Image (cartoon, helix red, strand yellow):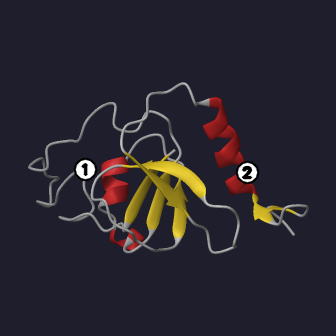
């Protein structure tokens, strides 16, 4: 099957995530230990929790953009999904002022007035 490792029956994204994590073990990770379970029954992915300490469920989707994470977090099309941001510099430039508006009076850097995702994975 396309995108599958036939020997382990896991999605290719899972394998990339695990190999990238193992290379970054020297980083000082803050937060409580957490696990990401995938519906395909593969082993849980160890991670760190930040934000509200609660369990959530949702479809895991990827955003590979280099900029625009405030727009992604507030995009209604991601409602109820677990969003994976794959660019390593997410959050380094802060969050724009929500009072900045376009020529139509809509927020310039946000898609709506609230965060719609169920969870966030910062890769």
Horizontal and vertical percent position of residue 5: 85, 59
Residue 115 or residue 43, whichever sits in front: 43
Side (left or right) of 98 relative to 55: left
Badge 1 density bin: few <14, some 14–19, many ≥20, Cα 10 Å = many
Residue 18 drawn at (x, y percent): 67, 46
- Look at the picture and state if 121 lies above or below 39: above
Is 27 left or right of 119, judged from the image as shown? right
- Dot label at residue 109: 1
- Residue 55, by quadrant, is bottom left
Say which of 14 and 2 sits in front.
Answer: 14
Residue 14 image-quadrant placement: bottom right
Q: Is residue 109 above or below residue 39?
A: above
Which type of secondary structure does the marked residue at label 1 adopt? loop
- Secondary structure type for disc 2: helix
Question: Residue 104, relative to residue 70: is it above or below?
Answer: below
Residue identified by numbered label 2: 15
């Amino acid at each position: 099957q396309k995108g599958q490792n036939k020997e382990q029956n896991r999605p290719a994204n899972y394998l990339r995530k695990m190999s990238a994590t193992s290379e970054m073990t020297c980083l000082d990770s803050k937060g409580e230990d957490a696990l990401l379970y995938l519906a395909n029954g593969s082993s849980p992915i160890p991670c760190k929790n930040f934000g509200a300490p609660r369990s959530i469920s949702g479809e895991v989707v990827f955003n590979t953009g280099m900029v625009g994470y405030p727009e992604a977090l507030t995009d209604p099309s991601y409602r109820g999904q677990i969003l994976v941001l794959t660019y390593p510099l997410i959050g380094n430039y802060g969050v724009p002022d929500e009072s900045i508006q376009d020529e139509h009076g809509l927020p310039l850097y946000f898609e709506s007035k609230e965060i719609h995702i169920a969870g966030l994975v910062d890769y």
